């Protein structure tokens, strides 16, 4: 396959891309078509790497309203409602909803997804189903699974034993939820335990960290210290960290030094963080987001996730990372022209770093031929005008193609 005349990641110079045997084999200003080669002339369209969602919950997806709607819009009511819905989970139910959500995400250009899976369930129904899903979708989606103890590790009966069991079942990462544990002591101990399990089973770590507006919630400092001292560093991700938006500046100044030393990743989920955050404020009302702009300015890797697709924590969601990015740029005031132009990295390269898949990611000769083509010359235009994704190509095969719609004005 030969893609002609494309702007790769906003570069003004036009390039041709050759794909052979599922791999990028040549990227040059002009390549002559080979005999029998499929040629697609893209006439100056934008090409970027595939979208990455490093934080979603496929076990709860598409359950909004079952058994009730979260009318309060709080994180804690979401957990309560999910605890009830969890009682009725079946293997087939989880698989059907998860695959439907993944197909929706793939239709919008996602090729890499990390799903947190609630493992505070003695039967581990959702995890066992999603392990099967991970295998079934591998030809068109790279799916990672995080063992997520929704109701705590120490605060849930036999939580430690369950985490060891799921590590042996074959998850990709160990999770935690320190801010939801009963006490500060439990919070710290749960993180130490999560790191011990991850090291024993050679797994990544991705913990829901300080997902609360409480400035006293400081699990992040423990996470970063453990990442630094254990040497796991970039294999560790702190998701949400919304309490950081409420920390005082003096503490953040001290904390930032540790965060840079630790090399950990961050995932912000603008749609859900904006929706759930600040619920207990009157005015001034907090935005409920971590300090994305400051972290990014300090060279710390930050990616955006969608988090929830129609579940007890978020009544909307359509599997489109452009929605999360659009909201995130506004909420964090990352709105300079060059910032918008290059903002795709929050939902591409940065997410690939979180998932630890950079060896197989990126538009470079020798890497797997995965890319997206948009009906625009650059990403600023793509995001602003929501131009169509013309192609999603995975391992050299077209997964999704779109014919641009025609709009008629009758005035």
Image (spheres, rainbow, N blue to C red):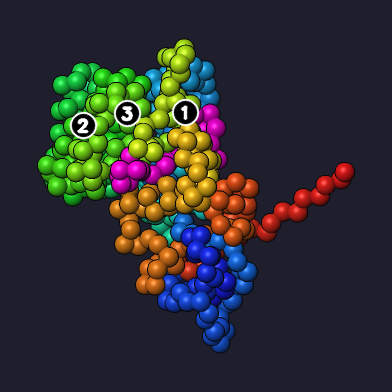
Magenta-colored segment: predominant secondary structure: loop
Residue 254: assigned label: 2
Mark 1 = which residue?
274
Q: Residue at x 50, y 44 (%)?
A: 336
- Label 3–label 2 contact, CB within 8 A: no
Does residue 143 show up? Answer: no
* The one of 89 and 101 positioned closer to us in this rendering: 101
Counting residues from the start of the chain, the first of labels 1 and 3 encountered is 3
Q: How many marks?
A: 3
Mark 3 = which residue?
244
**Mark 2 surroundings within 10 Å by alpha-carbon count, few (fewer than 14), some (14 through 19), many (20 or more):** few
308 vs 316, left or right, is left
Q: Secondary structure at mark 2?
A: helix
Camera-near label (1 vs 3) is 3
Camera-near label (3 vs 2) is 2
Question: Residue 301, image x and y in percent?
Answer: 32, 46
Q: Quadrant of residue 207?
A: top left
Q: Secondary structure at mark 1?
A: helix
**Mark 1 surroundings within 10 Å by alpha-carbon count, few (fewer than 14), some (14 through 19), many (20 or more):** some
- Magenta stretch? 295-319
The residue at the far left in this view is 229
């Amino acid at each position: 396959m030969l893609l002609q005349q494309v702007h790769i990641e906003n570069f003004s110079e036009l390039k041709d891309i050759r794909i052979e045997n599922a791999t990028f084999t040549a990227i040059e200003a002009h390549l002559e078509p080979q005999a029998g080669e499929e040629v697609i002339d893209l006439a100056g369209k934008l090409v970027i790497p595939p979208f990455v969602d490093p934080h979603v919950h496929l076990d709860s997806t598409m359950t909004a309203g079952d058994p009730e709607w979260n009318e309060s819009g709080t994180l804690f009511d979401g957990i309560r409602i999910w605890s009830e819905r969890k009682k009725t989970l079946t293997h087939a139910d989880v698989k059907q909803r998860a695959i439907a959500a993944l197909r929706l995400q793939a239709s919008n250009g996602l090729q890499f997804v990390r799903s947190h899976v609630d493992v505070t369930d003695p039967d581990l129904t959702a995890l066992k189903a999603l392990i099967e899903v991970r295998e079934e979708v591998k030809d068109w989606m790279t799916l990672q699974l995080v063992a997520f103890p929704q109701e705590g590790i120490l605060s849930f009966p036999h939580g430690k034993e369950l985490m060891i069991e799921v590590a042996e079942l074959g998850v990709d990462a160990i999770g935690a939820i320190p801010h939801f544990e009963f006490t500060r002591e439990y919070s710290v101990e749960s993180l130490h335990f999560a790191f011990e399990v991850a090291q024993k089973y050679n797994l990544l770590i991705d913990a829901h960290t300080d997902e609360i507006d409480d400035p006293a919630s400081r699990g992040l400092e423990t996470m970063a210290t453990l990442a630094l001292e254990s040497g796991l560093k970039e294999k560790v991700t702190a998701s949400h960290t919304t309490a950081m938006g409420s920390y005082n500046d003096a503490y953040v100044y001290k904390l930032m030094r540790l965060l840079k030393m630790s090399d950990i990743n961050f995932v912000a989920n603008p749609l859900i963080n904006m929706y759930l955050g600040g619920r207990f404020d009157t005015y001034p009302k907090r935005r409920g987001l971590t300090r994305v702009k400051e972290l990014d300015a300090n060279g710390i890797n930050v990616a955006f996730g969608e988090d929830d697709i129609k579940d007890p924590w978020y009544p909307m969601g359509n599997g489109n990372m452009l929605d999360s990015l659009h909201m995130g740029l506004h909420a964090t005031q990352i709105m300079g022209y060059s910032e918008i132009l290059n903002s795709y990295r929050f939902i591409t390269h940065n997410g690939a770093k979180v998932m630890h898949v950079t060896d197989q990611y990126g538009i470079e000769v020798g890497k797997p031929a995965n890319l997206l083509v948009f009906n625009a010359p650059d990403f600023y235009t793509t995001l602003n005008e929501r131009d169509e994704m013309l192609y999603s190509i995975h391992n050299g095969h077209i997964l999704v193609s779109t014919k641009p719609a025609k709009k008629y004005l009758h005035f």
